[in-house]
Image (cartoon, grey):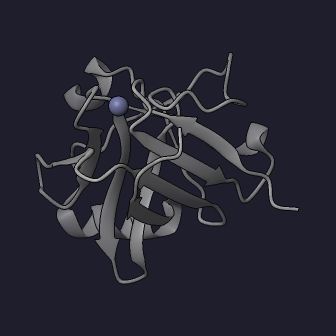
Amino acid sequence: MTVQLAGHCHCGSVRVILEPGRPVGEMPLRACQCSFCRTRCAETTSDPGSHLFVEAAPGALNHYQFGLGVTDFLLCAECGTYVAAVSETEGGLMGVVNVRGVALHGFEGRTPDPMTYDDESADERLARRQDRWMPVVVTEVQPSI
Ligand SMILES: [Zn+2]
């Protein structure tokens, strides 16, 4: 049976399902040190063997870009929660989930690894993500909450 971790943004308009590719306790937990992530206390996870599903009500997802412009930060249009970050890669849509934003269980009490990616070029960034990020499916539907 596939383990599924479910979470949602503060208002419930955006829901996520994470299917971790390994035991949750072994999933990485990262705290990107950029100003966007730090001001949101974001702590993200991803693992190439995992799958992330994002379900949003119609119009409930805002796509925010900054810096190199190769990443879509998915924010709830209703409550502003930073839900996930995704990039189009050769392997398809890949991303990370903000486990704090959507309150995913299983990561409580862990100290995230601080990550700094300031010096990366756009190519290096996409290559790293292909190695570490996980496939993401984004669906805009009406949640059944
Ligand atoms: Zn919301």
Expressed as whole percent of the image width and height from the top left, the position of residue 124 reads: 29, 65
Expressed as whole percent of the image width and height from the top left, the position of residue 8 reads: 50, 35
Position of 24 with respect to 98 (left or right) is: right
> From what the image shows, is residue 18 above or below residue 35?
below
Q: Nearer the viewer, residue 122 or 57?
A: 57
Instruction: Examine the image and state in which quarter residue 117 appears.
Output: top left
Task: Report whether residue 1 is seen.
Answer: yes
Task: Report whether residue 34 is seen.
Answer: no
Q: Nearer the viewer, residue 56 or 5?
A: 56
Position of 119 with respect to 29 (left or right) is: left
Total marks placed: 0
Q: Residue at image x 67%, y 28%?
A: 107
Expressed as whole percent of the image width and height from the top left, the position of residue 67 reads: 11, 47
Image quadrant for the N terminus?
Answer: bottom right
Instruction: Examine the image and state in which quarter residue 14 appears.
Output: top left
Position of 17 with respect to 35 (left or right) is: right
> From what the image shows, is residue 127 above or below residue 73?
below
> From what the image shows, is residue 137 above or below residue 56?
below
- Displayed-image quarter of ligand 1: top left
Expressed as whole percent of the image width and height from the top left, the position of residue 133 reads: 48, 60
Position of 121 with respect to 57 (left or right) is: left
Q: Nearer the viewer, residue 140 or 17?
A: 140
Q: Residue at image x 81%, y 60%?
A: 2
Q: Residue at image x 79%, y 53%?
A: 3
Q: Please, which residue is most extreme toward the right here?
A: 1
